[in-house]
Structure formats: structure tokens, C-alpha cells
Image: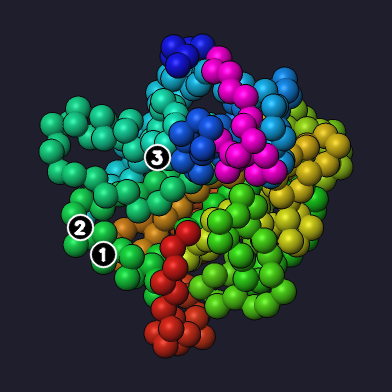
């Protein structure tokens, strides 16, 4: 067995011939399916010297390399901070690039462990029950309940649409007017959530609102400053509002409207932004969480954006109130609460 920090070498056996790479890693390396996919997505698995996709079929005799986990402690947790406590809930800020929770098969830093450490430093022994997860590349607010009862209350209120989650995103293209993405997402055991041709319940819609459009050199400068491919002639800084989210909901819905997140190679691969072989990078920030028990607001620290802070803050405070849910949405939620989790 390889020592920590060393490359592990494995030869594909006859029993794994024809299997998908992610499934084969479960038998050959003892990884869970989730851990295998994480390692593949992060570029930590090579097949005959090359990175590969999870769906690639194995052949007997192929040489697999498991690269050492490089995400031990890169300072990302330094950006974790306590935003505020309100009643039975407390919100933390997650920086982009940091995983939300511990990952099987990885020693990577994550928000939950860093937040618990911060909580302990304030001599608080109340356990944290985290209520949300954000993608690694997504920054912003993550809320935790301070009791199991508060967690159940949040889940019930969320299922009835009483919590609003507002994000800021940089979209590829020009959003001229508010739009709503209302298609069902198929998230069952999928690396990429698939948009289906049928209407989702109102509480599963994503509403997009244009806040500021950048064009030409201004757009190119913002993309370059944030390490994104300069492939767009226009980009839109948009607000994205959801209530009951599914996995990758905003990313999939934005791409379905022809306005994918800039740099999101998973949902809109281009020559400049191919499907990722390493950590993903795009600008998506959970900026406001509002519900019956409180409201938290946190603006992102993105580079070179013409950030109209007071304008965005007022917009978020106004449009993120839990009482802005429409009568139609309330009636639908009362009859058939959305229960599936993201």
C-alpha cells in the first residue's frame, strides 16, 4: 500500500473490464462512489497517464494512478467567518473554493469543520446542524440550526416556500429583462442535473433579474480579473432567487435559458471553458437568506465589478423577504409541500 503523499498505482483486473471508471475505482481502490467521482473531477485519477471522465470504460491491463490529495490545508478556511446569530439559527460565510462538508476519500478543508472551530472559540458548546450546502466554487451564506427542533422547523418552513435564497451570479450573455426558469430538474444520481421538458412546482422555479450588464472591454476586464475565460462580448450581473433548491439548480436553469454562468464548463462547455478536470471556477454567491426567523445578507468580494453596493443591498433586502411569495405559490405549497431535498 502506498504511503500518504505518494502516487498509488493500480492495474485494472479482468473483473473490472468494461466497467465505468468511477465504479471500477470502488472495487480496485476501496473508494465510495462519491469519493471516486470527487477524485476524478479533481483530476486526481489518471488512466494510462491521462485524466479521464467518470463514464470512461475500463480495459483489463490499464494502468491507474491515484495522485496524492493536494487539498490538505491551503488557507481557504481563513475566509470562513461568523456572519450573525438570529434566534435559533446562525449563519457563516463560505469562501469560493472551499467544500461545504467533509468529503469521503479526501483530507480537504471544509466549511463545517472550520465553522465548528470558530463556534468553539467563542466558548459555545451548542451543536450546529447545517441546513445548506454550496458547490465548492460557490461562495456565500450557509446557515445552521442550533437544535434538532430548529432544524425540523426550518425544513418544514422551507418545504412550504417560507425561506427565500437570493444569489448573485455573473452570466454569459445579456439578460435584458427578468426571466423565470420553470423546468423540472432530474438530479437522480447525476453529475450533471438534466433539465426536463415539463413544468416544475412553483417553489422549484428560479427567477433571474438583471442588475447590471457589462459589454466589450469592460466585460473582458471583469472576466480576466476573476480568472475566467474572456469569451463573452457581454456578461450580466444577475440576481437569482430560489425557494426550494435542487442540486445545481441555478447553474442548470441558467444554462437552459442560454445564459450559463461564466466559466461553468460543466453546464455550458466551450472551447475556452471545457468540462472541468480540476476545481471549477465561476461567480455564484449566496448573498441573502430570509425567512420567518431572520434575514442574513452578505455581498461578494469580486474583482473589478462596478459594484453598486447600496443599490444591490436594497434590492436584496426588498426582494428576499419571505412575505413576497405569491398567493398562487402559497396555495400550491399548502396543498403539496415540496419535500425532496437538494
Q: Name the residue under label 3.
A: 101
Asked which secondary structure carries label 1, the reply is helix
Q: Name which of mark 3 and mark 1 comes first in the sequence.
A: 3
Going 58% across and 23% down the picture, which residue do you hit? Answer: 10
Whether residue 245 can be seen here: yes
Q: Where is residue 197 in the image (x, y as percent from the top left)?
A: 72, 74
Marks 2 & 1, CB-CB < 8 Å contact = yes
Q: In this view, does 142 lie to the left or right of 122?
A: right
Q: Name the residue under label 1.
A: 152
Q: In this view, does 78 lie to the left or right of 16?
A: left
Going 47% across and 85% down the picture, which residue do you hit? Answer: 332
Q: Name the residue under label 2.
A: 148
Relative height, residue 291 to residue 224 (above, below): below
Q: Is residue 189 left or right of residue 140?
A: right
Crowding near the residue tagged with mark 2, few <14, some 14–19, many ≥20 C-alpha atoms within 10 Å: few
Q: What segment is highlighted magenta in the picture?
A: 7-25
Amino acid at each position: 500500500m502506498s504511503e500518504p503523499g505518494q502516487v498509488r498505482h493500480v492495474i485494472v483486473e479482468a473483473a473490472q473490464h468494461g466497467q465505468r471508471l468511477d465504479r471500477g475505482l470502488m472495487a480496485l481502490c476501496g473508494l465510495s462512489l462519491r469519493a471516486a467521482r470527487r477524485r476524478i473531477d479533481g483530476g486526481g485519477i489518471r488512466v494510462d497517464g491521462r485524466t479521464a471522465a467518470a463514464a470512461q470504460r475500463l480495459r483489463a491491463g490499464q494502468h491507474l494512478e491515484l495522485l496524492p490529495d493536494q487539498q490538505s490545508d491551503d488557507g481557504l478556511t481563513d475566509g470562513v467567518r461568523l456572519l450573525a446569530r438570529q434566534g435559533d439559527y446562525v449563519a457563516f460565510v463560505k469562501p469560493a473554493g472551499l467544500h461545504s462538508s467533509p468529503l469521503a476519500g479526501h483530507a480537504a478543508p471544509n466549511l463545517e469543520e472550520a465553522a465548528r472551530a470558530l463556534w468553539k472559540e467563542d466558548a459555545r458548546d451548542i451543536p450546529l446542524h447545517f441546513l445548506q450546502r454550496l458547490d465548492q466554487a460557490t461562495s456565500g451564506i450557509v446557515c445552521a440550526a442550533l437544535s434538532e427542533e430548529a432544524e425540523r422547523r426550518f425544513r418544514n418552513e422551507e418545504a412550504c416556500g417560507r425561506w427565500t435564497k437570493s444569489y448573485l451570479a455573473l452570466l454569459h450573455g445579456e439578460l435584458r429583462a427578468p426571466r423565470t426558469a420553470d423546468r423540472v430538474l432530474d438530479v437522480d444520481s447525476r453529475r450533471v442535473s438534466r433539465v426536463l421538458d415539463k413544468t416544475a412546482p412553483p417553489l422549484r422555479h428560479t427567477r433571474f433579474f438583471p442588475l447590471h450588464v457589462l459589454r466589450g472591454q469592460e466585460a473582458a476586464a471583469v472576466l480576466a480579473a476573476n480568472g475566467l475565460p474572456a469569451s463573452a462580448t457581454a456578461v450580466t450581473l444577475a440576481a437569482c432567487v430560489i425557494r426550494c433548491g435542487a442540486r445545481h439548480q441555478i447553474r442548470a436553469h441558467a444554462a437552459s435559458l442560454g445564459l450559463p454562468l461564466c466559466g461553468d464548463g460543466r453546464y455550458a462547455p466551450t472551447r475556452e471553458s471545457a468540462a472541468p478536470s480540476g476545481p471549477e471556477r465561476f461567480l455564484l454567491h449566496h448573498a441573502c437568506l430570509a425567512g420567518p426567523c431572520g434575514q442574513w445578507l452578505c455581498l461578494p468580494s469580486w474583482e473589478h465589478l462596478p459594484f453598486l453596493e447600496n443599490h444591490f443591498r436594497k434590492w436584496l433586502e426588498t426582494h428576499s423577504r419571505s412575505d413576497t411569495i405569491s398567493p398562487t405559490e402559497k396555495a400550491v405549497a399548502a396543498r403539496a409541500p415540496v419535500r425532496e431535498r437538494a
